[in-house]
Image: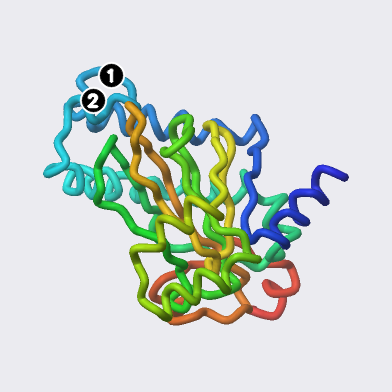
């Protein structure tokens, strides 16, 4: 119980938390990786996900990534698997009436590829009531990891955007950002209103990660409406009863 309370306390104060998936729920990650490797083996040359950059160029990476994303989203059970793996967290944080982003996204970041989002937050396009789930498919360390800005530093970062001083974004990200090494089987969950930053991957490994968004069915939707961007993944018995 103390561990659970600490998770929610950390999320409340920082706007993000790392969460360990129960081992019984982890099968979907290994299964997905096996299916990707089998379907797109020409891009791997029989090697590991982490060595993807050895056989692919910066110029071709985005078209390859889109092909893999299209394949991933034919796996209709994947979103359910992710939801149930994180259900204990969701039940306490957003309740049983849950919608999910329609398409699972995939990020592939090869070493020293500078095509990446800089310091930003997903609102107001996304809802402030939305949880972003970042799921590494390989063990991530150092600059392979997401950099998160704690909530108590947001006013400072907001002031940089108002002054349009982009040159300071990376400086302040380095100074105030929190970067946690995350292994396969752990996820990073953060509020869509939280500033985050993807550093240049200066390791010798390619980073693979999924990201997906969840929110309560009955909370505000930002600029994305239910029908276009989300689908219902779970409802309470009360909601089901009153929907008939």
Residue 241 placement: quadrant: bottom right
Q: Is residue 10 left or right of residue 155?
A: right
Against 19, residue 243 (above or below) is: below
| Mark 1, other Cα within 10 Å: few <14 / some 14–19 / many ≥20 | few
Q: Position of residue 92 (x, y in %)?
A: 75, 59
Cα distance, mark 2 to mark 1? 5 Å
Checking the image for residue 44, the label placed there is 2
Q: Where 86 sits versus 159, above or below? A: above
- Secondary structure under the numbered disc 2 in the rendered image: loop
User: Which residue is pictured at 44% across the width and 31% down the height?
Assistant: 138
* x, y percent for residue 227: 43, 77
Q: Nearer the viewer, residue 165 or 50?
A: 165
Which residue does the numbered mark 1 point to in the structure image? 47
> Where is residue 84 drawn, in percent x and y?
62, 47
Q: Residue at x 23, y 30 (%)?
A: 53
Q: Using the image, determine if residue 49 lies above or below residue 98.
A: above
Image quarter of the N terminus: top right
Q: Residue at x 13, y 42 (%)?
A: 60
């Amino acid at each position: 119980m103390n561990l659970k309370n600490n998770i929610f306390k950390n999320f409340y104060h920082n706007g993000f938390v790392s969460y360990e998936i129960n081992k019984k729920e982890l099968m979907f990650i290994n299964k997905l990786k096996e299916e990707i490797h089998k379907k797109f083996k020409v891009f791997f040359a029989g090697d590991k996900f982490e060595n993807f950059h050895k056989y692919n160029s910066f110029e071709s990476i985005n078209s390859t990534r889109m092909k893999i994303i299209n394949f991933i989203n034919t796996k209709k059970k994947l979103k359910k698997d992710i939801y149930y793996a994180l259900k204990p967290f969701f039940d306490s944080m957003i309740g049983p009436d849950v919608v999910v982003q329609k398409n699972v996204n995939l990020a592939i970041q090869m070493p020293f590829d500078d095509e990446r989002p800089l310091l930003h937050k997903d609102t107001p396009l996304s809802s402030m009531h939305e949880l972003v789930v970042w799921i590494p498919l390989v063990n991530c360390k150092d600059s392979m990891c997401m950099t998160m800005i704690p909530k108590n530093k947001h006013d400072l970062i907001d002031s940089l955007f108002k002054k349009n001083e982009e040159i300071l974004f990376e400086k302040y990200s380095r100074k105030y950002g929190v970067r946690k090494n995350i292994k396969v089987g752990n996820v990073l969950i953060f509020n869509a209103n939280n500033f985050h930053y993807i550093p240049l991957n200066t390791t010798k490994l390619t980073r693979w990660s999924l990201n997906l968004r969840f929110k309560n069915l009955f909370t505000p939707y930002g600029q994305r409406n239910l029908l276009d961007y989300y689908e219902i993944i779970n409802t309470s018995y009360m909601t089901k009863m009153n929907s008939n």
